[in-house]
Image (cartoon, rainbow, N blue to C red):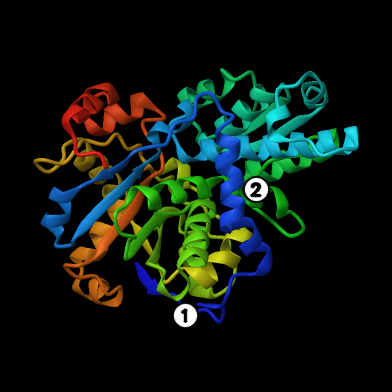
Amino acid sequence: MFLLNSTADYRLALDPRDEKTLDASAAVEVERHLAFRKDHAVTPLVALPGLASEIGVAAIHVKDEGHRLGLGSFKALGGAYAVIRLVLKQAEQQLGRVVDMAELHSSEVRAIAQTMTVACATDGNHGRSVAQGAQLVGARAAIFVHAGVSGERIAAIARFGAEMIRVEGTYDDAVREAARVAEANGWIIVSDTSWPSYERIPGLVMQGYTALVREALRQMQEPPTHVFIQSGVGGIAAAVAGHLAIEFGKNRPVFTVVDPARAACLFETARAGRPVTVAHGEPTVMAMLECYEPSLVAWRILARAADAFMTVDEADATDIMKRLANPVSGDPAVVAGESGGVGLAGAIKAVADPALRAALSIDGRSRIFVVNTEGATDPGKYQEIVGLSPAAVAARNREGALT
């Protein structure tokens, strides 16, 4: 399914609150925070000239977040960053002075963090980031996971010392239960989705994601003409679209949001012109994108800054995993999890359809940018789908063309 943005807010300036969250000065602060993370390294921007030539565009660049902060997904930038910012804010209130990021590991700040409990619901990646952030500062973390989260993903979160709480139902059920329990216990919810009266913390999470956009723009010789970003509740799509809209104004790239067909809450919201909840049906292999209600803040941004919305099917997601693992001659191999390559799957699907290609003004000069949002966060599932272990695929990358 595909539709162009026809909402009343399309191409309006961002809401001032969102512009403040996603502008260059905020992104600089995120990058400054990363400088204090001992495991920080700029993630690679992978050029796929062979695939670009095959589908008839000038360039394809993949920002590979499978290497981010040892967590294997872009969400490492968001949850942990929000936790750290919340701890510093609490320290400022208790100490009665400005507390700089450089004081994060001081005894004063750590003593305050130890009195705090952060909580969230997760499909896997966001919870891992929140748990890591809590461990970094000495806070406690309680992570709520729904029935569809694999044991391997739960174990990956638990290794950061988080309390794991199982919830029957979907991700959205886990979001509601986390909010209920947190309120009853005086915990701080660090969610990557927003709802009425709860926007500031999801805004911090999205703010963390701007670092990958800043890095990518520095890594490219020319900015992209087209961007395809996958969406769960919409946070990563909104962060990328919003930052690019601020950076380039009327000359921003054509931006397409890509949803799983089985959990297309952003697509259906765009169709309705207002936030809607989609029915829970058969689970999608794109587990990190299996969300049925959009983030209100993310939708507010995407209503203005996204040009189109589309869906991809189950086979599209698994096919792109295999295609990246077994690339066109001369291209490097990329380890992409079940949700990681969905933006690229959408781009290939759009380019192959003459009507979509025309609607998005894609031609032989187009430069496409996508984000591999996760590596093999569930290695067993990855090998089951691709037929190779993540290590075996990564080994093919030794002579790849990294920019």
Residue 206 visible, this orientation: no
Mark seen at residue 17: none
| Residue 395 placement: quadrant | top left
- Which residue sits at x=57%, y=65%? 301
Asked whether the residues under the numbered discs 2 and 1 touch, taking CB atoms below 8 Å apart as contact, a structural biologist would say no
Q: Nearer the viewer, residue 66 or 278?
A: 66
**Residue with the mark numbered 1:** 6
CA separation in Å, label 2 and label 1: 28 Å
Judge whether 272 appears above or below 211 on screen.
below
Q: Nearer the viewer, residue 65 or 347?
A: 65
Label 1: few (<14), some (14–19) or many (≥20) C-alpha neighbours in 10 Å: some
Horizontally, residue 341 falls left or right of residue 164, namely left
Judge whether 342 appears above or below 388 on screen.
below
- Which residue sits at x=35%, y=69%? 2
Q: Nearer the viewer, residue 340 or 223?
A: 223
Horizontally, residue 110 falls left or right of residue 340, namely right
- Which residue sits at x=40%, y=55%? 229
Q: Could you say where residue 116 lies in the image, as x and y percent from the top left?
A: 79, 29
| Count of numbered circles on the image | 2
Judge whether 35 appears above or below 246 on screen.
above
User: Residue furthest toward the left?
Assistant: 329
Label 2: few (<14), some (14–19) or many (≥20) C-alpha neighbours in 10 Å: many
**Residue with the mark numbered 2:** 204
Q: What kind of element bears circle 1?
A: loop
Q: Could you say where residue 325 lies in the image, as x and y percent from the top left?
A: 21, 35
